[in-house]
Image: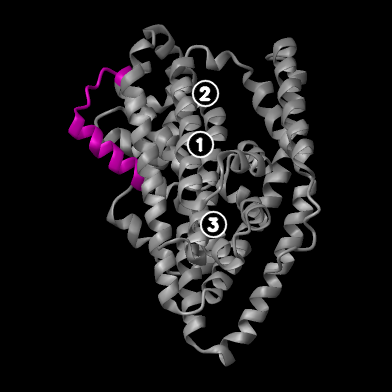
Amino acid sequence: MSDAPAGHAAPGHGTIFAGLVVGAVAGGVCNALWRDTAGLALVVRNVAQPVGQVFLRLLFMVVVPLVFTSLVLGVNGLGDLTRLGRISARTFGLFVATTVAAGTMGIFLVNAVGPGRAIDEAVRAELMEQFAGQAAERVGAAEQVGFGVQTFVNIVPRNPIDAAARGDMLALVFFSVIFGVALASSGPPRAKPMLDVVASIAAAVEVLIGYAMRLAPVGVAALIFTVSARFGFDLLLPLSLYAGVVLGGLALHQFGVLALVAAGLGRVSPARLLRRTRGLTLTAFATSSSNATLPTTIRTAREEFGVSPEVAGFVLPLGATMNMNGTALFEGVTVLFLAQAFGVDLSLATQAIVLVMVVLTAVGASGVPSGSIPLLIVVLETVGVPGEGIALVLGIDRILDMARTVPNVTGDLVTSIVVDRWERGGVP
């Protein structure tokens, strides 16, 4: 891929942030003045939600070709397979380390604060009744998804085209990496024609990304308006302590753990990391999706931090699929919060099992809005907490999902920066 791709005349960070603020304020005001009115519901359903969905669909539209071309070109750009193995080991090592740190932090915080013990019986009953239908649907989805050995078997697709069509990103990543390795092993004369085709597709995808990002201010405003107009801030009140633990943990991981990793291993100061990821952060927050944010993540890594195209093209698609720091923290907090709410006492040994499971399910979580919920239900029922209890948090999950996507994509970016520095000779 070129270092300065055409079609990336994206709006500035200030413009996207303005769209975020305008959408949030407008939605909050409308919720306060016209809550439960047919007019507001009509505007949300027929204007704001469709505009936001069009923006999201434009981003999702390019994810499959972007992941495939990035990984194939990234693998071949790395040269010999020994280097590929070294980069893979370093990448997965950082993924696991930061995800375990996030999950551990979440479990520690929820034990220290104990938000589940503060929920009133009446509030619990009201939330269960209000979201019982959604909870039943999610439990049914969880039963279909499951988690175990078969999850890892399913990473190898029977039909890669079918996997791509279904949005099975782990299977697509596996096929793309294997295809890239096979292409590299076939020798330059045979590989070059196919690599030229893949590179042309990648160039066209980057132009499409530029087109989509031009709509970012409007799309972001519509997405935020939809959330704030529907929910306002009322749903945060009965669950404010739980939400505070999740948001506080995400902030600590974002500005503490990831900033320290970037500074200590990537030689990027926290101030620089914060300053140059503003656009990435806003896109992640508004879309609630690591996959939808992937084009922006790759662009930020290359243009703002000088990460090589090969490393960015290999590390970041993997990260968007299997490196979910914020999701692991959220799941750890939520499992223990609901255990506290239902009076289920989890021993330290059981909490250690929860930590292992949230790390594993964070890898298997779909990189789309609320993609972790079905697997989270699996964890709940494994440790004896009713899966239907997810109804307690569904009301504010959209807001928390937006927040946890930020450290998800920041963790991917930081990993690419560190791996690139190591590959340039930054490791003794």
Q: Residue at x 45, y 24 (%)?
A: 393
Position of residue 366 in the picture relative to residue 229 (left or right): left
Classified by dominant secondary structure, the portion drawn in magenta counts as helix
Given the image, on which type of amino acid does mark 1 rest?
Gln
Q: Position of residue 126 (x, y in %)?
A: 45, 12
Q: Is residue 427 above or below residue 136?
A: below
Q: Which residues are magenta?
A: 340-360
Q: Is residue 354 magenta?
A: yes
Callout 3 secondary element: helix
Q: Which residue is mark 1?
A: 254
Residue at the outermost bottom position: 189
x 31%, y 27%: residue = 386
Relative to 83, residue 367 above or below: above
Q: Which mark is residue 164?
A: none
Residue on which disc 3 sits: 316
Q: Earlier in the sequence, mark 2 or mark 1?
A: 1
Label 2: element kind? helix
For the image, the number of numbered tags is 3
- The type of colouring in the image is one colour
**Residue 395 numbered mark, or none:** 2
Comparing 412 with 116, the one in front is 412
